[in-house]
Image: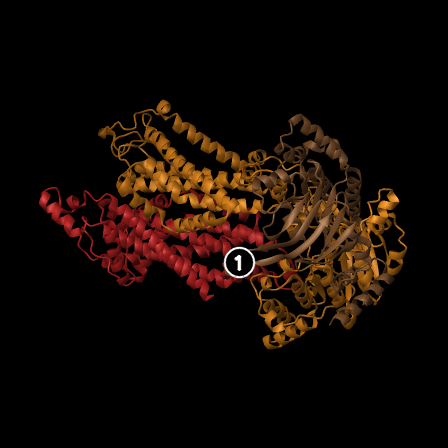
Chain colours: A brown, B red, C orange
């Protein structure tokens, strides 16, 4: 049996409610696993908890119960410092290319920040920066410039380079292409795939777009209101889903062929009627 | 809405308690020379001791504070150690003076600052720059110096307004107005400066929001869009600044009352603290803080009425 | 996208935002302010060296003397040289302000950082304390403190520093909270940075400038308060300070009014330049360049030959060219020679990526372009009237025959008014309905657009409803006054895909029911396939291809359209298949 890189078991995440109201359960007991070198896609609409799950794995959300196990070791219940030490194996790429890079720092400073924490020497860090920029298809002299000089797609590439700096085993990607133009989106997605093929890094790829997730994921999990309602092979879940919610999601995603879209529209209407 | 008001009142009460305790503590740390100052240099040691016992200075501080609070809630603030006048009476007779001053300033400020801020925000260009200059001048000149300048110009050189003195509205309405014009002008300059800046920047910021474009797309007149919708949006931060200014005004009143020889609370507390007249100081502080609480409450209520989201906090 | 971001997105790649100091130095007022403060500080520091006389030397024979060669500013009530007293006075005044400033920033910065970053009980406690402090009249408190600490200036100013620290605290705390929520701080955490490093690296740099601005303000207020106390005679009478000079001048106001002018001017000048400095810094911080004014000859629009169109055309856009001035004499064009006809009852999709000009085109039709936009040439024909030549006509149509559905539902409703108010007022204005009639019609509309509880929504505020509901409200508003033409700017982009499908259904139904003509701006070809009869593809401000939706989507001619359609992932292979084709299959997943 292939070993699991990351395993999430019955994870519950709660956020404190305002004043006297009930705490809000963002995750109601979810379980999934990721194997080395694989991409697990996580798809859902707003409020589904998909971002929260990603953040919980990164240690950015409060876990109420359940466990997250990485390479056999538990991530939950760790102190801040231990968490930081384990952190270099799990990195992140976020959605907004405009606010995920500190606008006041140079690209080189941004890329060497994670390296500095791990005690890498300045010299080594600088050559690593060139290596990273090359790996994501950016000009190697970009180091001295600042984020505002680059387009959204280029900034995401830099964010990916930052995530790769520590040679992680898993990267949590939180809607990394949602804010990009159509043409840029395709290119950045292919970059993700290319990197995975070359380095064997695993991804948890969060997105609201079924087709994006289909393109990049080996397995797909569908979330709805804090639960995982379906988890399985990418092709199956995104083309022949078994859960009614996933079917509804698929039917609601418009396609660019008018005939096909009409058919899909009918299917959606039929689903809605069947449901009511 | 009511829970909102209740919460604000509770906060006001807490403020009153804290301010009173702090003041009482400060005033009573160093009470050694008071008896002497009251009785005069000729007093004997016995007389001093007797006076101290009479004033209760030999009793523990906490006991005296509780006693004071007990009296205060009934409206009995005791008697001035130096004049033997009822503190309540003194404070109440001085209150109208300070009230005329600060409330008048708040009203004048609200009107002028709004006008200037909106003008600067909508016309831009030269008008904007003029308003900025007025702002800087208003912020730069300390209010009491402004008062002095105003006296020199409008009371001494051109005898339009009285240089000193307060006329009670009961005596003569015109006299009252005339006696407070210069002091209010002196006080409001810096307040107008701060509030108009806030109105201007808030107005510009709100006008650039998406929903203003959508409102225009519904065919509403520009006048309605600006003066009903944008102004309302800009009102909340402006009101916050106004509330803050009010607190500063009470401090400003202390000095301005001296300049214009107005028998108000500011003048009272200045001399009372120098003498060490504890009951009088406590009385003035209690009333002033109550004033702040009331004004803040009014402004909060207006804000809550304008901005439904504010009612939640 | 707000007006600001729209305009900003269009300013051509601006020259690098210059560093803060450089921007500051380019502001003439800023330079003046810094110069003035510098001079005052210098003069005060050098007082012992440059003062012509001993400031405490009393010579009653020259009391109240007017300015002379010996005494440039005259002599005061005790015959002391005014100029010397002014110079020495500066030292104490400035030193006092420095003390309160330092205390205020120290207390405010540290507590603000801790409270903002860690939250918790410290946050609640310090928030409470700062509210209490801010509500207490500081002058009165200082007077009370004076009873305890005596006339010492330094201690009094230090206490004042504590009293005024809440303003710094508030500033720092809100700045920290804002940064704490930024993604780049999350990224730093994930990279393993410790909290102290995150604060130092990312947080401090953000609050630095606002603190300096606030510091300038505090400096000014400190000087005023200090002078006030001295004016009341509560300072040390033997030390010359500006406040003391004012107090002495006041006592002798009728004899020597000029004596109050000099110290007052000194104070006003110092505070004034501090205020100006703060303003200049704030302006440099915001760096919002006001749009340059175009020269009249450059701004004049070209005359466009209008091509008449048939009755069946609802709207005809002809040769539309719009730009924004980047200098006095040049304009950056954002849409160029855009032409298309909208048939009656037709839905036309305007497709493009960001920067294509599709939103600018939409706003041009409505007359809602941001301030500073220049329509360089073109015509928009509606029922024979060119809306660009006749702006009055365009304004008259807006909200009636010409309606707008915006992109972001939540930010497009006025948060201070109920949904009902925002719906009914235009009904009363344009259709002349009474408030009762308008209310009934609004309720019916809300019901028609699929809102479950119209009554409750009518009296709700925008923050009390969901995004999907808000979009339905906006659509209801758009159709409420029976328009002929609707311009919808990416009406479903901000919504979940399931809600999107419902909204598109709604738009289709409304269009069919009322025979509306629609311009639908979108970047999603699926939406085009779902809803549009015709489509125009835009790139870099131009239309590169247009035609019937069916044929264009199935068989695009222009390379750009082809590449865009190829980028859609509709018929993409699932990953496992792509891997196999690439030769890097993963081990069997089952």
Judging depth in this view, the residue of B223 and C557 nearest the camera is C557
Residue carrying label 1: A18
Residue C214: x %, y % from top left: 47, 42
For residue A190, side relative to residue A161 (left or right): right
Judging depth in this view, the residue of B78 and C249 nearest the camera is B78
Is residue C157 visible to the viewer in this orientation of the structure? yes
Residue B177: x %, y % from top left: 33, 58
The answer to which image quadrant residue C463 occupies is bottom right
Count of numbered labels shown in the rendering: 1
The answer to which image quadrant residue C53 occupies is top left
Residue C538: x %, y % from top left: 80, 51
Residue C399: x %, y % from top left: 68, 65
For residue C366, side relative to residue C416 (left or right): right
Above or below, A15 relative to B276 = below
Judging depth in this view, the residue of C509 and C361 nearest the camera is C509
- Circle 1 marks a residue in which chain? A
Residue depicted at 44% across the width and 43% down the height: B137
Please tell me whether mark 1 sits on a helix, a strand or a loop: loop
Looking at this view, name the residue that lies furthest to the front. A1
For residue C300, side relative to residue A80 (left or right): right
The residue carrying pointer 1 sits among few (fewer than 14), some (14 to 19) or many (20 or more) residues within 10 Å by Cα, namely: few
For residue B149, side relative to residue C191 (left or right): left
């Amino acid at each position: 049996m292939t070993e699991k890189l990351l395993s999430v078991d019955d994870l519950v995440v709660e956020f404190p409610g305002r004043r006297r109201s009930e705490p809000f359960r963002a995750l109601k007991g979810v379980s999934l696993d990721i194997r080395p070198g694989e991409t697990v896609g996580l798809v859902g609409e707003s409020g589904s908890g998909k971002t929260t799950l990603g953040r919980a794995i990164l240690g950015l959300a409060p876990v109420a119960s359940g466990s997250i196990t990485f390479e056999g070791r538990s991530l939950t219940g760790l102190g801040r410092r231990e968490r930081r030490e384990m952190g270099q194996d799990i990195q992140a790429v976020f959605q907004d290319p405009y606010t995920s890079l500190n606008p006041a720092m140079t690209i080189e400073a941004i890329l060497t920040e994670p390296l500095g924490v791990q005690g890498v020497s300045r010299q080594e860090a600088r050559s690593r920066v060139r290596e990273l920029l090359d790996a994501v298809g950016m000009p190697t002299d970009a180091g001295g410039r600042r984020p505002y000089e680059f387009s959204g797609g280029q900034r995401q590439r830099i964010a990916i380079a930052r995530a790769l700096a520590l040679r992680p085993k898993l990267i949590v990607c939180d809607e990394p292409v949602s804010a990009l133009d159509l043409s840029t989106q395709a290119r950045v997605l292919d970059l993700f795939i290319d990197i995975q093929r070359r380095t064997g890094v695993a991804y948890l790829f969060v997105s609201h777009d079924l087709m994006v997730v289909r393109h990049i994921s080996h397995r797909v999990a569908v979330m709805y209101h804090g639960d995982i309602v379906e988890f399985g092979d990418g092709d199956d879940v995104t083309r022949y889903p078994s859960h009614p919610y996933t079917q509804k999601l698929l039917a609601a995603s418009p396609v660019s062929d008018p005939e096909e879209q009409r058919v899909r529209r009918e299917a959606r209407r039929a689903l809605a009627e069947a449901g009511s | 809405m009511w829970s909102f008001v209740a919460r604000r009142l509770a906060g006001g009460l807490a403020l009153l308690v804290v301010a009173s305790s702090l003041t009482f503590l400060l005033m009573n740390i160093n009470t050694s020379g008071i008896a002497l100052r009251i009785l005069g240099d000729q007093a004997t040691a016995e007389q001093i001791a007797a006076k101290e016992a009479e004033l209760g200075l030999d009793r523990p501080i906490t006991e005296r504070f509780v006693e004071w609070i007990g009296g205060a809630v009934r409206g009995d603030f005791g008697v001035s150690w130096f004049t033997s006048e009822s503190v309540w009476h003194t404070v109440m007779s001085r209150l109208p003076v300070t009230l005329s001053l600060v409330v008048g300033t708040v009203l004048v400020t609200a009107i002028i600052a709004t006008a200037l801020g909106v003008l600067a925000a909508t016309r831009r260009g030269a008008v904007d720059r003029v308003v900025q200059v007025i702002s800087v001048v208003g912020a730069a000149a300390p209010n009491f110096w402004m008062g002095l300048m105003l006296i020199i110009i409008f009371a001494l050189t051109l005898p339009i307004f009285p240089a000193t003195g307060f006329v009670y509205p009961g005596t003569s309405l015109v006299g009252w107005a005339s006696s407070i014009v210069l002091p209010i002008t002196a006080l409001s300059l810096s307040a107008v400066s701060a509030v108009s800046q806030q109105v201007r920047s808030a107005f510009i910021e709100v006008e650039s929001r998406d929903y203003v474009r959508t409102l225009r797309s519904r065919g509403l007149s520009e006048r309605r869009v600006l003066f009903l919708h944008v102004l309302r949006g800009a009102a909340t931060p402006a009101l916050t600044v106004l509330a803050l200014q009010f607190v500063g005004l009470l401090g400003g009143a202390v000095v301005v009352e001296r300049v214009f020889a107005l028998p108000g609370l500011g003048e009272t507390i200045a001399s009372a603290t120098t003498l060490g007249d504890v009951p009088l100081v406590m009385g003035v502080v209690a009333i002033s803080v109550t004033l702040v609480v009331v004004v803040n409450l009014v402004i909060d209520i207006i804000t809550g009425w304008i901005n439904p989201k504010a009612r939640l906090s | 996208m707000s007006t600001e971001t729209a305009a900003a997105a269009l300013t051509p790649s601006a020259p690098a935002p210059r560093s803060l100091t450089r921007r500051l130095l380019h502001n003439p007022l800023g330079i003046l302010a810094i110069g003035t403060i510098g001079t005052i500080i210098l003069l005060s520091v050098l007082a012992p060296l440059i003062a012509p006389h001993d400031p405490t030397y009393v010579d009653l024979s020259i009391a109240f003397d007017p300015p002379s060669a010996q005494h440039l500013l005259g002599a005061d009530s005790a015959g002391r040289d005014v100029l010397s007293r002014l110079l020495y006075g500066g030292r104490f005044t400035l030193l006092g302000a420095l003390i309160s400033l330092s205390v205020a920033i120290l207390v405010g910065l540290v507590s603000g950082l801790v409270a903002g970053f860690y939250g918790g009980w410290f946050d609640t406690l310090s928030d409470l304390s700062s509210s209490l402090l801010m509500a207490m009249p500081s002058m009165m408190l200082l007077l009370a403190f004076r009873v305890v600490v005596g006339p010492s200036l330094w201690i009094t100013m230090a206490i004042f520093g504590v009293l005024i620290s809440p303003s710094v605290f508030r500033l720092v705390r809100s700045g920290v909270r804002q940064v704490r929520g930024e993604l780049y701080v999350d990224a730093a955490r994930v990279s393993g940075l410790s909290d102290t490093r995150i604060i130092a690296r990312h947080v401090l740099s953000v609050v630095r400038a606002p603190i300096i601005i606030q510091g300038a303000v505090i400096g000014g207020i400190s000087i005023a308060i200090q002078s006030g106390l001295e004016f009341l005679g509560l300072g040390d009478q033997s030390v010359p300070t500006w406040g003391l000079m004012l107090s002495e001048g006041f006592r002798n106001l009728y004899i020597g009014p000029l004596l109050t002018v000099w110290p007052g001017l000194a104070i006003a000048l110092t505070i004034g330049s501090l205020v100006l400095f703060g303003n200049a810094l704030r302006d440099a911080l915001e760096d919002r360049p006001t749009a340059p004014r175009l020269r009249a000859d450059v701004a004049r629009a070209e005359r466009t030959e209008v091509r008449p169109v048939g009755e069946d055309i609802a709207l005809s856009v002809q040769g539309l060219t719009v730009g924004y001035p980047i200098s006095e004499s040049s304009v950056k064009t954002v849409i160029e020679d855009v032409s298309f006809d909208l048939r009656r009852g037709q839905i036309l999709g305007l497709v493009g990526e960001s920067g294509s000009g599709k939103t600018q085109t939409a706003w041009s039709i409505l007359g809602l372009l941001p301030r500073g936009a220049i329509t360089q040439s073109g015509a928009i024909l509606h029922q024979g009237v060119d809306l660009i030549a006749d702006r009055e006509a365009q304004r008259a149509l807006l909200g009636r025959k010409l309606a707008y559905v915006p992109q972001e539902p939540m930010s497009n409703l006025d948060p201070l008014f109920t949904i009902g108010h925002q719906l009914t007022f235009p009904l009363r204005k344009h259709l002349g309905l009474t408030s009762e009639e308008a209310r009934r019609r609004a309720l019916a509309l809300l019901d028609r657009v699929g809102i479950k509880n119209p009554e409750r929504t009518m009296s709700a505020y925008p923050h009390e409803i969901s995004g999907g509901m808000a979009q339905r409200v906006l659509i209801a508003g758009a159709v409420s006054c029976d328009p002929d033409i609707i311009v919808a700017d990416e009406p479903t982009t901000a919504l979940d895909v399931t809600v999107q499908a419902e909204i598109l259904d709604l738009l289709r139904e409304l269009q069919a029911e009322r025979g509306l003509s629609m311009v639908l701006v979108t970047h999603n070809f699926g939406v085009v396939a779902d809803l549009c009869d015709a489509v125009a593809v835009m790139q870099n401000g131009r239309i590169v291809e247009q035609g019937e939706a069916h044929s264009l989507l199935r068989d695009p001619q222009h390379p750009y359209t082809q590449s865009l359609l190829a980028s859609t992932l509709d018929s993409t292979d699932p990953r496992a298949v792509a891997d196999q084709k690439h030769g890097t299959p993963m081990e069997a997943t089952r």
